[in-house]
Image (cartoon, rainbow, N blue to C red):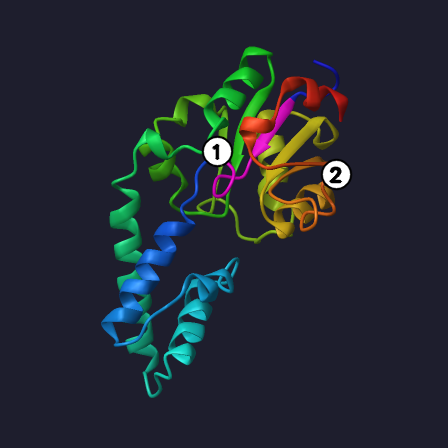
Amino acid sequence: MGNIRACIFDLDGVIVDTAVYHYQAWKRLANGMGFDFTEHQNEQLKGVSRMASLELILGWGNVTGKTEDEKLQLATQKNEWYNEMINQMTPAEILPGAREFVQSCRDAGIKTAIGSASKNTPTILNKLELSALFDVVVDGNSVTKPKPDPEVFAKGAAALNVPPAQCVVFEDAIAGIQAAVAGGMRAIGIGSPETLTEADLVVSGLDKMSLEQLNRL
């Protein structure tokens, strides 16, 4: 299989899309305070922390005078709604081609890992019935530095016992691609070539990915 011995996958936007649930939970929170929250606004929350996201939403709704305690309660409520939604997830929500491509890597003797900042990673993998497809899972429960710091991918490579130069990372975010590059790994972007300029290859989804393309990297 050439010199690629491991594939490390980001979870959100690569294997599954939970962004829709974050959006629905924030929208429910905003509606409860008497204003709306649009998908366009939601785009501006990508990669932004929960508390910072709440500050932006309160600003858009012109909500002022909330104490830190009240803000914490609102953010906690949002997270509870989000958790309820991901606990209802099913394997039908796996993004097209994701299961098949990961399986084809395993069949070819390539090790597989998840490298995600989400603390909900184990729950999501469990609901999608994908846990058995990954040798190693490195997530927000075991990582302290956010991407573009390469920590999450470096830990994945170390746990797989594969040198970074023989690992390929699959990512849909610019910070994730940067983390892979900083960690000395090759990076395949899931999304648009115009955005993910630092990736070695960009495809629209794992349904457009093959072992042949992996070998050509």
- The amino acid on which the numbered mark 1 sits, given as a three-letter code, is Val
In the image, residue 49 above or below residue 126: below
Gap between marks 1 and 2, in whole Å? 19 Å
Left or right of 56? Residue 29 is left
- The residue pinned by badge 2 equals 184
On the image, the x and y values in percent for residue 76 come to: 29, 63
Task: Tell me if residue 49 is in the magenta stretch.
Answer: no
Q: Position of residue 38 (x, y in %)?
A: 40, 65
Q: Residue at x 51, y 34 (%)?
A: 114
- When the figure is inspected, residue 23 is found, relative to residue 125, above or below; the finding is below
* Residue at the image position 47 percent from the left and 35 percent from the top: 15
Pick whichever, 90 or 122, lies toward us.
Answer: 90
Q: Which mark is residue 137?
A: 1
Instruction: Work out whether 196 lies above or below 58.
Output: above
Left or right: where 161 falls relative to 37? right
Q: Is residue 61 above or below residue 72?
A: below
Looking at this view, name the residue that lies furthest to the bottom.
65
Q: Decide: few, some or many residues near mark 2? Use Cα within 10 Å; few <14, some 14-19, many ≥20.
A: some
Kind of residue at disc 2:
Gly
Q: Label 1: how many residues lie within 10 Å, few (<14), some (14-19) or many (20+)?
A: many
> Element type at marker 2?
loop
Circles 1 and 2: CB atoms closer than 8 Å: no
Percent from the top left, x then y, of residue 141?
44, 46
What residue is rendered at 40% in x and 27% in y?
131
Give the magenta part as a residue range.
6-14
- Dot 1 or dot 2: first in sequence order is 1
